[in-house]
Structure formats: C-alpha cells, structure tokens
Amino acid sequence: HPLADVLRHNIYRERIAETVTDSVRALLLEIANYNVQVFEFIGGEHTSKNVMITAAKRKRSRSKKELEGLRNRLKSLCCLHGIQEQRLAKWVGEALSLDGDVEDRSPPSAKNMPPL
C-alpha cells in the first residue's frame, strides 16, 4: 500500500482516518447536491477534533459530468484506503466500490439512526 509506512504508526493512522472520513462525508454531500465547506472551527491547541463540515443545498443540480467526476473521486478515495462500507453512503445510496454495488438504499429512519 502506498501509505504503509505512514499507516504503521497509530497516531498517523488515526489522523488519516479522521481526514479521510471527513473527506468521504464532504464528497457524499456534494453528490447529494450540496455546496460543502470544511474548515477548522477551534484552534488545534484545544482539541484535535476541530473540523466542521457545513453544507448548503444547491439551487441547481450538478450536471451528469460533475456527478460522475465526484463519484469517481469518492470511489478512488475509498479504494485507496480500503473503505468498503460507510453508513452515510448506504443511506444516500452511493456505491463506494468500483463495481458499483450498494447493499442498502433505504433512507435513514429513526430505527437505524445512531443515538444522539
């Protein structure tokens, strides 16, 4: 794996996992027709978990070409990091693998939502 020497250190593995997870979330929101911004909202000296993702619904839908590009980027990112499943991707019906299979396309409900 291209990142094997980085991922063998737990602290780096944890940081990369957080970054990749937030990147997957942002891409999924973009695919769902949101404008997305990711930014630091609390200085890193206070907490390592200081990223906020904001999303605003777009008035006009993305073109098929834009969506295809976003989906390719999502799948490439997931492939690079070995991500085969992600709950938000399931809820919005997006495939993470290059073969395009999505197991569950059911929308989120109170029954399968994580606890608050």
Image (cartoon, rainbow, N blue to C red):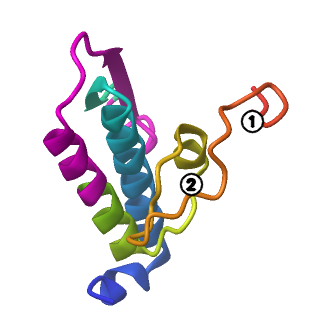
Residue 86 is labelled as 2
Residue that protrudes farthest toward the right in the picture: 111
* 47 within the magenta span: yes
- Specify the amino acid type for callout 2: Gln
Q: Nearer the viewer, mark 1 or mark 2?
A: 2
Q: Is residue 69 above or below residue 113?
A: below
Q: Residue at x 35, y 21 (%)?
A: 55
- Left or right of 86 on screen, residue 42: left
Residue that protrudes farthest toward the top in the picture: 59
Q: Magenta part of the protein: which range?
A: 43-72
Residue at numbered disc 1? 114
Q: Quadrant of the C terminus?
A: top right
Q: Secondary structure at mark 1?
A: loop
- Left or right of 88 on screen, residue 60: left
* 29 within the magenta span: no
Corner quadrant of residue 107: top right
- Between 88 and 99, the residue placed more toward the observer is 99
Q: Residue at x 36, y 53 (%)?
A: 19
Q: Residue at x 64, y 58 (%)?
A: 103
User: Is there any visible trace of residue 44 in the rendered image?
Assistant: no
Q: Residue at x 47, y 49 (%)?
A: 94
- Specify the amino acid type for callout 1: Pro
Q: Secondary structure at mark 2?
A: loop
Work out how far the residue at label 1 is from the one at label 2, CA to CA, in angstroms.
Answer: 13 Å
How dense is the environment of label 2, judged by Cα within 10 Å: few (below 14), some, or many (20 and up)?
Answer: some
The answer to which of marks 1 and 2 sits earlier in the sequence is 2
Residue 23, horizontal then vertical, whole percent: 34, 48
- Between 19 and 45, the residue placed more toward the observer is 19
Q: Quadrant of the N terminus?
A: bottom left
